[in-house]
Amino acid sequence: MRIGITCYPSHGGSGVVATELGKLMAERGHQVHFISYDMPFRLGRFYHNVHYHEVEANRYAVFRFPPYDLALANRMAQVAKMHDLDVLHVHYAVPHAVCAYLAKQMVGDSLKVVTTLHGTDITVLGEDPSLKDIICFGINKSDAVTAVSDDLIRQTQELFCVDRKLNRIYNFVDPRVYQPIDVSDIRSQYAGPDEKLLLHISNFRAVKRTDDVIRIFATVTSQLPSRLLLVGEGPEWSHSLELAKELGLEERITFLGKQDEVARLISLADLLLLPSAKESFGLVALEAMACGVPTVGSNAGGLPEVVEHGETGYLSEIGDVEAMADYAVRLLSNPELYRRFSEQGIQRARVQFSAEKIADQYEELYRQVIDQ
Ligand code: GMT
């Protein structure tokens, strides 16, 4: 098949999933064309059948806002015609689903559009009256729509006038990359031999409740020798730093900023904290599970579909910092319980969320829309 992929190429779960899926499709022999404003950051090594088509918005002085959406639709149509694309798979509804629909109008019905909903395109932007109707339009006009969890399907149906089938296809991890890695040579840089290392990775947006991360850690570290590693950057980052100082924890917390080698970083840690207010899936919890690191977090959105409460991690109500801290202490101070959670997590990631299994599901969906 000849597959076009559009995503947000910068750091973020939807861009990671789109890029990894494109690489898997290329490994299966399909022609893959990424169409975006930047090279997807996880593309990595060279593949002879992966192409990248850059989109550049016109910055003519008349435009107060450069018309990126039109430039994207135009590029999608160009690439679809030039390379005879069968499918255009867009990740994140807005504006990608609408741009793909426009491109399809320019190219003709032979171009099929698959839209994957990732979360904030529905749960945050779907509540914005300036976008709601056009997101709904993009969803209804796609040839197939997928969402990354059952909870996201439920929320999409609740929020929108969507009267079409939504396919649940979970996110995945590549077990060749996400597995327990021996990082004993660098662990001492972050924690002492008798200290536990807690980890949080996110884009530091308000929905991640990074204050809760710091407060959970404050309780844990008062009961167990431990340190916290914070990875990522975003609007709440400075506030987290302030709170760490206010609670006298700055010596025990390392702010690492944006990082790419996620599997190695996760393997350093004993526990992932993810107390989000919204989380359609929680890719980082799956990545952690695959590396044998359990998650303690909230039961928001699709997280309970990823982390099995009491089996591969512990989940509490959003904002229940005390319960999350208690769970973290329980897990970290009981080696037998910890070993069981860790092994069950590795197994669950391999079986339920294996890259090959999920790639099969997307491939099957592409074939169905092409045969429609
Ligand atoms: O907020 C983020 O974590 C980034 C966001 C994105 O669009 O990349 O993540 C969303 O998509 C990920 C991949 O499907 C999911 O794992 C995240 O749970 C989801 N984020 C939210 O729902 C808040």
Image (cartoon, helix red, strand yellow):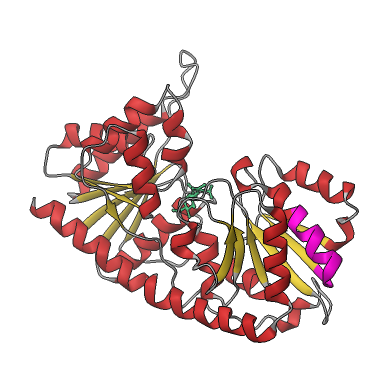
Is 113 placed left or right of 308 in the picture?
A: left
Instruction: Give the magenta part as a residue range.
Output: 214-226
Q: Is residue 23 above or below residue 330?
A: above
* Residue 53 in view in this figure: no
Check the image and report above or below for 220 versus 175.
Answer: above
**Residue 112 percent coordinates (x, y):** 18, 46
Q: Is residue 165 left or right of residue 216?
A: left
User: In the picture, residue 364 is in which quadrant?
Assistant: bottom left
Q: Position of residue 134 (x, y in %)?
A: 33, 27
- Percent position of residue 3, x then y: 25, 54
Residue pictured at 35% horizontal, 41% vertical: 156
Residue 306 shows in the view: yes
Magenta stretch encompasses residue 222: yes
Count the marks: how many? 0
Residue extending farthest to the left is: 372
Residue closer to the observer: 253 or 300:
300
In which image quadrant can residue 261 be found? bottom right
